[in-house]
């Protein structure tokens, strides 16, 4: 079985408070982007006592047995029985880029195994399993545009507000440690939540929608801020860093013809939404 885990961007990200469990409460809008990994699994054709994962494409920086896909499968095996698997993951979504690639891979394998082996896991349970793996993992169970609160697991569907716009997604190839990013932020409850802001005309977003991680990321890696500035200079209606970085996107009314060459070299996806 072959599936294609999809990336996401964040239309704003506000950190509203620290939690007693060590996590943070956030408000964000998760929005899917047509940038995909490829994930294939088959029942192991030879006797085995473990699942075997092979990873190709962009390096993820961890051993296959420590990959989040194996973590998701192991979590499922705690309660459900199914054959040992051979899995091939081809990475196209950069790791640690604020695009949710790992969480999407994990959610996709959970959904696919549930369907393929007819495990009959209900929505509440599979969302709970996903949350144990990662805060944004529940979003990828369905992957529709959603306003997210809590750790990111409380999801409220929204209209596809980017439909018809053109998106350019840029990744500078530098990493941002999520834990370090959280340690350098100051939680605050916003005057107006992103659910309300995202319903406004996109031309108003530049003055209204923020990502609380940007200040830290721009200081640590000034190239990220320069990407955002140049996307605006190229005619973007709205531009923002996604998640804790380091990818930056620009939203345009149509395909722009004046993107600087240095920026074009870092484009990892572009197209109509």
Image: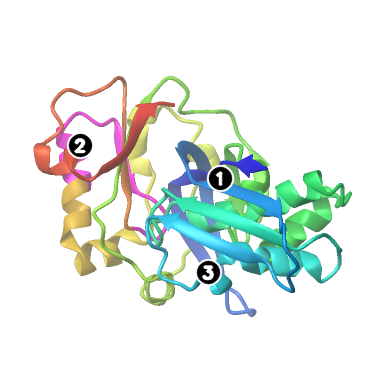
Label 2 SS: helix
Is residue 265 highlighted in magenta?
no
Q: Nearer the viewer, mark 1 or mark 2?
A: 1
Q: Which mark is residue 158?
A: none
Q: Position of residue 50 (x, y in %)?
A: 70, 72
Determine whether 125 is above or below 61 in the image: above
Relative horizontal placement of residue 36, taking residue 153 as reference (left or right): left
Mark 1: few/some/many CA within 10 Å (<14, 14-19, 20+): many
In the image, is 60 to the left or to the right of 116?
A: left
Query: Of discs 1 and 3, which sits in the foreground?
Result: 3
Which x, y percent locates residue 205?
Answer: 36, 37
Marks 1/2: CA–CA distance: 29 Å
Q: Is residue 136 visible?
A: yes
Q: Nearer the viewer, residue 185 or 52?
A: 52
Query: Toward the viewer: 269 or 145?
Result: 269
Q: Which residue is mark 2?
A: 232
Name the residue rendered at 87%, 52% in the picture: 119
Whether residue 185 is visible to the viewer of this picture, yes or no, is: no
Label at residue 64: 3
Calculate the distance from the C-alpha at mark 1 to the C-alpha at mark 3: 17 Å
Name which of mark 2 and mark 3 comes first in the sequence: 3
Give the x, y percent position of residue 117.
83, 49
Q: Residue at x 42, y 64 (%)?
A: 60
- Residue hosting label 1: 5
- Identity of the residue furthest to the left in this view: 261
């Amino acid at each position: 079985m072959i599936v294609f885990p999809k990336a996401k961007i964040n239309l704003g990200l506000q950190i509203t408070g620290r939690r007693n469990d060590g996590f943070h409460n956030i408000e964000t809008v998760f929005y899917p982007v047509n940038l995909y990994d490829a994930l294939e699994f088959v029942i192991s054709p030879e006797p085995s006592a473990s699942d075997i994962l092979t990873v190709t494409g962009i390096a993820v920086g961890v051993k296959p047995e420590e990959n989040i896909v194996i973590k998701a499968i192991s979590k499922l095996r705690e309660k459900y029985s199914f054959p040992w698997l051979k899995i091939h993951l081809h990475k196209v979504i950069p790791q640690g880029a604020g695009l949710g690639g790992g969480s999407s891979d994990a959610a996709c394998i959970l959904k696919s195994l549930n369907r393929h082996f007819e495990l009959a896991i209900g929505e509440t349970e599979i969302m709970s399993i996903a949350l144990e793996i990662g805060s944004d993992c529940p979003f990828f169970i369905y992957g529709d545009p959603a306003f997210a609160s809590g750790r990111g697991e409380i999801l409220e569907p929204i209209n596809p507000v980017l439909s018809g716009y053109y998106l350019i997604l840029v990744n500078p190839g530098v990493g941002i440690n999520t834990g370090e990013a959280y340690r350098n932020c100051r939680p605050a409850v916003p005057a107006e939540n992103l659910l309300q802001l995202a319903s406004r005309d996109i031309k108003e977003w530049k003055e209204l929608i923020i990502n609380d991680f940007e200040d830290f990321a721009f200081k640590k890696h000034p190239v990220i801020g320069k990407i955002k500035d140049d996307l605006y200079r190229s005619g973007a209606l709205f531009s923002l860093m996604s998640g804790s970085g380091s990818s930056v996107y620009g939203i345009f009314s149509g395909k722009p013809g004046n993107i600087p060459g240095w920026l074009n070299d870092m484009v990892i996806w572009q197209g109509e939404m």
